Amino acid sequence: MPENYMFLTELLGLKVYDLKRRRIGRVRDAALVPLVDPVRVDRFLVGGGWAWLTVRHDQVASISLDGIYLRDENLTPHHGDEYMLRMVRDLLDQQVIDAQGRKVVRVTDITFEIRQENGHDVLWVSDVDIGVRSIFRRLFQGVLPPRWIRKAQVIIPPSSIRWEFCNIVEPDPQRRLRLNITHQALENLHPADLADIVEELSPEDREAIFETIASDAAADALSEVEPEIQTSILESLETEKAADIVEEMAPDEAADVLAELEDEKSAEILDEMETETKTEVSELLEYDEDTAGGMMNTEYVSLHANAKVNDAVAALKGHEELLESLNTLLLVDADERLAGAVPVARLFVAGGDTPLKELSVERLLSVRVDEKQARVTELFDKYNLLTLPVLDEEGKLAGVITADDIISVLRQK
């Protein structure tokens, strides 16, 4: 806690005095203007009789528990504040996202730091308070003197979030722009953490998040949320934005989420997608979801059966987006029929001229696209598989099923 600080509960109702130390009203709210400064309180809204007055930060001389004393009393009536983020109206008792703690919290108080700027006091938003201590202050606000409350609260552990780690959820896209609200911190979260956060929000707030964050981050998070929430999110978005997100998903995940939508909405999203991705996803949608075809992914790396380790390394460099999850290279003959499977780890213990056939697994397992989900799961369990090739009706390589796909199936059950 800084040496000079003040809570919103103490600021509200604080008396405001003019140059002659006459009381002109009490503080009813305080506001940031994020486009000007995202931390410094820019305005105080003061209730004086029948109207509210606006006090700019540079009109204040000093701020303390004894009151706010002005150095300029040329005040104006409060009017439209579309560029203001007001502490009471927009933050107090509202949900915000704690990007560092990866959770949704409700604001119960706000802590300000009192600083000196050009010879006068200003307030800087320091923390958003969320714990029992801030609730205690709220309960006794106006009942006990602020100094008594400060002394009594020390027995309660503090709980707060630094202001820079707070992400405000604002459903109105125009107001988000006016308030300069971004979700860069959310994009840096692990997709599973962002998915957990999204599931705690209201449908309107989920839509606001997915409208704002980058499509690749949105796709990663959407892959992690529950199926019914996936459907709700995509149905709430504009078709073009929904298509941008679905395009960033793995084809099998995209097909799964589109299969849960109404046919009309699914077709609209497909129409907005790029041709190549649209074709891949459309083909996967033709398979029943409880078959190998409905489970498989069409993103894999295959090489000719006569390729060597050097060729494999070059292929991996050309598919960097798959490296995080790729564990097996597939070998095919001239007719695209499966000829072998090489664990990626084996490339590191072989010379560059080593034929990949020599590194292929001894027992080559595969399934047809119409194989039932139960049988596929059984094979993964029995043989401890990481990747299982899937063949089409003509015996050609059509896709792969990975252990992650099996985990997703089991989790849904």
Image: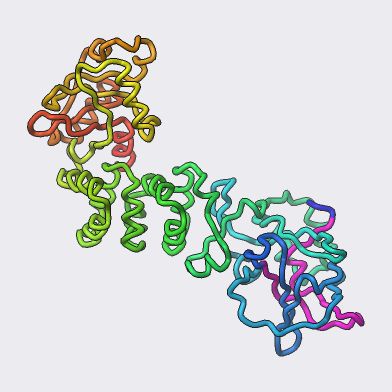
303 or 221, which is in the foreground? Answer: 303
Kindly give the residue lying farthest to the right in the view shown.
20
* Residue segment shown in magenta: 4-32
- The image shows residue 327 at horizontal and vertical percentages of 34, 25
Residue 283 versus residue 167 in the image, above or below: above
Residue at image point 81% right, 57% down: 152
Split into 4 quadrants, where in the image is the C terminus?
A: top left
Residue at image point 52% right, 50% down: 186
- The image shows residue 241 at horizontal and vertical percentages of 36, 58
Q: From the viewer's perspective, tell me whether residue 86 is left or right of residue 209.
A: right
Answer whether residue 8 is magenta in the image.
yes
Residue at image point 77% right, 72% down: 142
**Quadrant in which residue 252 is drawn:** top left
**Quadrant in which residue 64 is drawn:** bottom right
83 or 113, which is in the foreground? Answer: 83
211 or 113, which is in the foreground? Answer: 211
Answer whether residue 313 is magenta in the image.
no
- The image shows residue 111 at horizontal and vertical percentages of 73, 59
Residue at image point 49% right, 48% down: 187
